Image: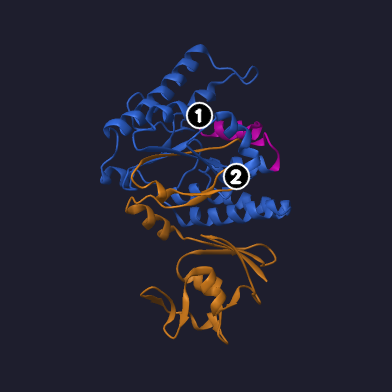
Amino acid sequence: MWQALYDELKTKDFMIVAVAEESRGADHARPWIEQAKADYWCLIDTDHRLAELYGMVNVPQSVWIDAAGRIVRPPETAGSTDHFRRMDLATRTLTPEDQAARAAARAAYLDAVKQWVLTGAHALEPDAANRKLPRVTPEIARAHAHFRLGVWLRRHGRDAEADRQLAEASRLHPDSWNMWRQAADLVAVGNAGGPEFWQRVRALGDRPYYPPPDLPGFPR
Amino acid sequence: MAILLTETGELTVASTDGLWLSAADAERATGWTLKAEGMCRDALCVPLPAAALRDGRVDLAAFWRTLDNVALSDDAGEIWVLGAGADARNQALAGLVAPDFTLPDLDGVPHCLSDLRGKKVFLATWASW
């Protein structure tokens, strides 16, 4: 997914770390990774540890980290947009206008990453970065523990008990699409994009599924 | 026997009656050492509630919760998650130092974020679902 960007920038003291939030394990992510022919880091995160450490709630989300190991852009949507919400579900297609707008947003996002690597543009000052950090509540902290336990129980065949733990995680952290969709996928591959997913997306109303990043080319 | 899922991985310990562990196992699991002052790590000591210490064994779940962390288990009380609490997570992010992690690639080879110090890193998640 990021190989062209990496090819362009890999001589500029730059690395991409693409992490699969994939509780089914490495073999489930393998076809996508092999098809991408990536030579940046592609890692497997069965416990969604990254989401827990960085407060991520959806995929794709990204964090920009400078050469000193400091966060210069906290988690934000990595180039995806809400155009999919207007998809014709019968044909699973977007209008040409929406397809074009979606592609333009993705290009704008990739360009922002490129400008950051080449010139330092778009890196936030510490105060601004701090303001954009996700806030972890006690409920969210508990949700991650329930999620971890649920994934462990699923891996060990204790599905009914696992699903109760995963449901509790989603109840405590309803904003986490990662938790809900991963749990749905563990029940059956494909469930994460099934009717209940679309129902949850519709229930967002005016709220975004992919909040646009505060970058040129995105709506304010 | 209990299986502990901690920040650093998974370990099996001999436990009785919930999560009562020997001081040695408690230290192995959490890095906190039982001393006269309480549970200690580096220069910091936290008093251990009287009810959480019996015959040299520690109620690790009770101790973990006194730190405002999360301790919870499966129905049988055999599988325990010792997670970080909200304050710990927020403090870890507040300094803007990117939380370090080690995760495997497709071949199981571990990769550590901090090994990339000196490079700008674009850290991005994705999923098949």
Q: Chain of mark 2?
A: B
Asked if B58 appears above or below A126 in the picture, the reply is below
User: Residue A83 or A157: which is nearer the viewer?
Assistant: A157
Asked if A182 appears above or below B51 in the picture, the reply is above
Evaluate whether residue B70 shows in this view: yes
Residue A18 picture location, percent across and down: 49, 38
Q: Secondary structure at mark 1?
A: loop
Residue A4 picture location, percent across and down: 45, 26
User: Residue A110 or B92: which is nearer the viewer?
Assistant: A110
The part of the chain drawn in magenta is A187-205
Based on the displayed image, in which of its 4 quarters is residue B61 positioned?
bottom right
Give the main secondary structure of the magenta stretch: helix
Q: Residue at x 38, y 73 (%)?
A: B42
User: Residue A139 or A112: which is nearer the viewer?
Assistant: A112
- Cβ–Cβ under 8 Å for marks 1 and 2: no
Same chain shared by disc 1 and disc 2: no
Asked if A127 appears above or below A117 in the picture, the reply is below
Q: Secondary structure at mark 2?
A: loop
CA gap, disc 1 and disc 2: 20 Å
* Color style of the picture: by chain
Name the residue carrying label 2. Answer: B107
Rendered shade, chain B: orange
Residue A111 magenta-drawn?
no
Based on the displayed image, in which of its 4 quarters is residue A149 positioned?
bottom right
Name the residue carrying label 1. Answer: A1
Q: Chain of mark 1?
A: A
As drawn, the label of residue B72 is none
As drawn, the chain in blue is A
- In the rendered image, the residue lying farthest to the top is A96
Residue A56 picture location, percent across and down: 47, 44
